[in-house]
């Protein structure tokens, strides 16, 4: 097999070398064709079958070897053989050549790829088995990138050769007709004035319009396929129907109402979803109280000899509920009804791609039809299947707010953002907190030095950080709750009073009709770049759609989902994830946008790193908060930002400048030239830009400037 591969490589290389060594490309241009046009046509008239065979072989070799010139050969086919025979010959020759290129790539490279990237390739192969023929047909109709790349890349997948050939034959036929027809017009050009002939202009106009028509055709075919078996209502009750009243659902409904659409929002529990009731609002209210206690404990650092605080944990938790109640009117049914949204309390279930059954509070179901539907069903805390967990009365980020007494020994399972935030807050109230994390550090999505800063602060505040610990089982022994974990091959026994599960959130995918409609998804609902599900009129946004589970991302997605649902097929927008910021509200606060070093390495993105230590910042020193850093990643040799991470006080607020810069293409040079108020924490952003500038100072120019100043001293 190895000898056969080497032999094939040798033959292919030899053919390509011959092509370039003898400058055969000179014959693949319009001028060369025009010079020989009369002789070629005479040969074709005298020996039509020989001419067709030679042309066929030449075309197959050109496409099989992925050589330039296929487009001119197609036009020449129309000029030599006319529209009918030209289309037939080019159609079969192009498909045969493409299939040969497909087979070459498979024979030479697929085994090597399987050995190196077998797991990733298996995922691609599964997608190709399911939808590969359709996507190949789409690429043949609408050439998003050159056909030769389609041939080579699909050869590396598990697509069947016969499928590739047949789909290519059918998919390229329409484009072949247009190009061959253009060739019939090119054959009649005798001068530059001939370019303006109506026939030629019509042919090239068709070439320009064809991709749009092809895209429309593909969308129509796909829609007919996916909607087969469903009966579409003759008239709709609503323009948009939104399932779920969390951040994504509220924003989608708001946008639809603002655009004067008839919209209904359905929520079975409390409006505001996780963010208002169990997430962002209560957690930040709790963190605020805990932060005040931490500041009082550090009073001596600010020259205050004695400061202390008396508090009741129950009163703190009552304040948390009061804050929720104060914010709740922003997400209330009354407010949204005033904005023009019909708000219904009940459980929704999809009956068809356009119909939803709503089981109201009165227990009576009724149906609504809608042209567009947005699924914003949110997520719930993840509960791992750890043996013995059913014997523990555990808390989650949803239920922890029911506490009115401070746990004495709190075990937090999970060292991500939720676990880290709550662990530090409870520790500052006086609980003995242990954080158990399977990864080698907390906040595993952040860079090493960022996570280390947080872990160092946690340990300094008395939090037991158990990283690299894998939970094995829970037990109740002699009246005590115990977690057994594995660490470096040893079993560790951890005793606790209260367990808080903080292992992320799981999208709500069941109970409202996704399974019955065949809408796929394992961890989240499967969507495309427009947030469309399997059915183009059904969209998903927020936690249920992923890939980010942030309130601001849910709102961001909701705009795209609502606008696309209301205006497709006339206009729709691809969701933009290029500048998604997020923050973890621990102390020191961590905020990030774009890439960090971990992600840049995973993606193979080249980058430069510039940092500025906040311990050197005047305002941070004055406030007693001289710790943290600003870290930016830039394109090598450029001031264009790839990402930024800030660790320190008010990091989330400071990050906004970098989010704006990345969104609008502003580089570090412009940040450096922007006036920042002194003394502020925001100066850290300017100083990191200054560090980048110094590292990229033009040394040769500065050497000449130094000589210039020395000369002026004379």
Image (cartoon, helix red, strand yellow):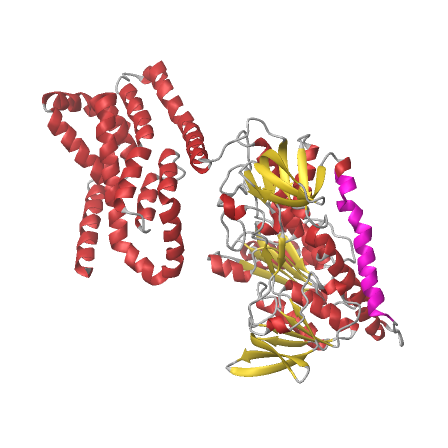
In the image, what residue occupies the spot 68% across and 81% down? 480
In magenta, the rendered stretch is 311-336
Q: Is residue 211 above or below residue 323?
A: above
Looking at the image, which is closer to me, 14 or 250? Answer: 250
In x, y percent, where is residue 607? Answer: 52, 57
Q: Is residue 618 visible to the viewer in this orientation of the structure? A: no
Q: Is residue 297 left or right of residue 85?
A: right
The quarter of the displayed image where residue 199 is located: top left
Q: Is residue 36 left or right of residue 452?
A: left
Q: Is residue 133 above or below residue 637?
A: above
Looking at the image, which is closer to me, 42 or 121? Answer: 121
Looking at the image, which is closer to me, 262 or 681? Answer: 262
In x, y percent, where is residue 373? Answer: 59, 38
In x, y percent, where is residue 162? Answer: 25, 43
**Image quadrant in which the N terminus is located:** bottom left
The quarter of the displayed image where residue 379 is located: bottom right
């Amino acid at each position: 097999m190895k000898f056969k591969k080497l032999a094939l490589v040798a033959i292919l290389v030899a053919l390509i070398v011959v092509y370039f060594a003898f400058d055969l490309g000179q014959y693949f241009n319009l001028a060369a064709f025009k010079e020989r046009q009369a002789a070629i046509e005479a040969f074709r008239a005298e020996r039509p079958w020989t001419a067709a065979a030679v042309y066929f072989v030449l075309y197959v070799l050109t496409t099989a070897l992925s050589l330039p010139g296929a487009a001119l050969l197609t036009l020449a086919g129309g000029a030599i053989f006319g529209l009918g025979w030209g289309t037939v010959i080019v159609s079969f020759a192009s498909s045969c050549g493409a299939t040969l290129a497909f087979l070459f790539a498979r024979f030479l490279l697929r085994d090597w790829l399987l050995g190196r990237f077998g797991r990733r390739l298996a995922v691609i192969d599964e997608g190709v088995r399911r939808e590969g023929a359709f996507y190949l047909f789409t690429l043949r109709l609408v050439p998003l990138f050159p056909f030769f790349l389609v041939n080579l890349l699909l050869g590396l997948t598990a697509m069947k050769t016969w499928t590739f050939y047949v789909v290519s034959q059918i998919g390229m036929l329409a484009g072949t007709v247009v190009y061959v027809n253009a060739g019939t017009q090119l054959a009649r050009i005798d001068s530059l004035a001939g370019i303006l002939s109506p026939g030629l202009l019509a042919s090239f106009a068709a070439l320009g319009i064809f991709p749009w028509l092809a895209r429309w055709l593909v969308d129509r075919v796909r829609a007919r396929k996916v909607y087969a078996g469903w009966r579409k209502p003759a008239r709709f009750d609503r323009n948009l129907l939104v399932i779920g009243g969390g951040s994504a659902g509220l924003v989608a409904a708001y946008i639809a109402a603002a655009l004067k659409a008839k919209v209904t929002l359905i929520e079975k529990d409390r409006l505001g979803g996780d963010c208002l009731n169990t997430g962002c609002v209560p957690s930040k209210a709790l963190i605020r109280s805990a932060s005040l206690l931490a500041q009082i404990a550090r009073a001596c650092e600010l020259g205050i000899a004695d400061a202390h605080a008396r508090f009741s944990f129950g009163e703190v938790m009552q304040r948390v509920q009061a804050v929720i109640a104060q914010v709740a009117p922003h997400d209330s049914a009354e407010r949204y009804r005033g904005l023009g949204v019909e708000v219904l309390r009940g459980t929704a279930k999809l009956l068809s791609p356009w119909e939803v059954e709503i089981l109201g509070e009165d227990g009576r179901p009724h149906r609504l039809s809608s042209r567009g539907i947005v699924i914003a069903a949110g997520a719930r805390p993840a509960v791992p299947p750890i043996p013995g967990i059913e014997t523990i009365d555990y808390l989650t980020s949803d239920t922890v707010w029911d506490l009115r007494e401070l746990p004495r020994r709190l075990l937090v399972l999970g060292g991500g953002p939720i676990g880290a935030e709550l662990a530090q807050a409870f520790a500052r109230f006086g609980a003995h907190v242990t954080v158990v994390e399977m990864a080698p550090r907390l906040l595993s999505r952040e860079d090493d030095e960022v996570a280390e800063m947080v872990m160092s602060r946690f340990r300094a505040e008395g939090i037991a950080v158990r990283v690299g610990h894998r939970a094995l089982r829970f037990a109740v022994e002699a009246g005590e709750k115990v977690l057994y974990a594995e660490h470096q091959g040893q079993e560790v026994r951890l005793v606790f009073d209260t367990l808080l599960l903080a292992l992320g959130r799981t999208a709500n995918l069941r109970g409202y009709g996704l399974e019955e409609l065949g809408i796929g998804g394992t961890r989240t609902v499967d969507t495309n770049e427009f947030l469309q599900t399997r059915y183009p009129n059904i969209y998903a946004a927020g936690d249920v759609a992923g890939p980010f589970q942030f309130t601001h991302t849910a709102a961001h997605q909701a705009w795209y989902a609502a606008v696309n649902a209301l205006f497709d097929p006339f206009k729709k927008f691809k969701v933009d994830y290029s500048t998604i910021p997020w923050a973890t509200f621990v102390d020191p606060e961590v905020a990030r946008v774009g890439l960090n070093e971990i992600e840049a390495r995973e993606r193979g993105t080249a980058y430069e790193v510039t940092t500025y230590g906040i311990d050197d910042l005047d305002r941070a020193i004055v406030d007693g908060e001289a710790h943290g850093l600003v870290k930016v990643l830039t394109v090598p040799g450029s001031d264009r930002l790839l990402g930024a991470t800030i660790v320190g006080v008010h990091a989330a607020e400071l990050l906004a400048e970098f989010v704006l810069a990345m969104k609008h293409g502003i580089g570090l040079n412009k940040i450096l030239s922007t006036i920042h108020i002194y003394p502020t924490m925001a100066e850290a952003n300017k100083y990191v830009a200054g560090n980048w500038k110094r590292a990229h100072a033009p040394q040769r120019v500065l050497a000449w400037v130094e000589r210039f100043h020395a000369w002026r001293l004379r």
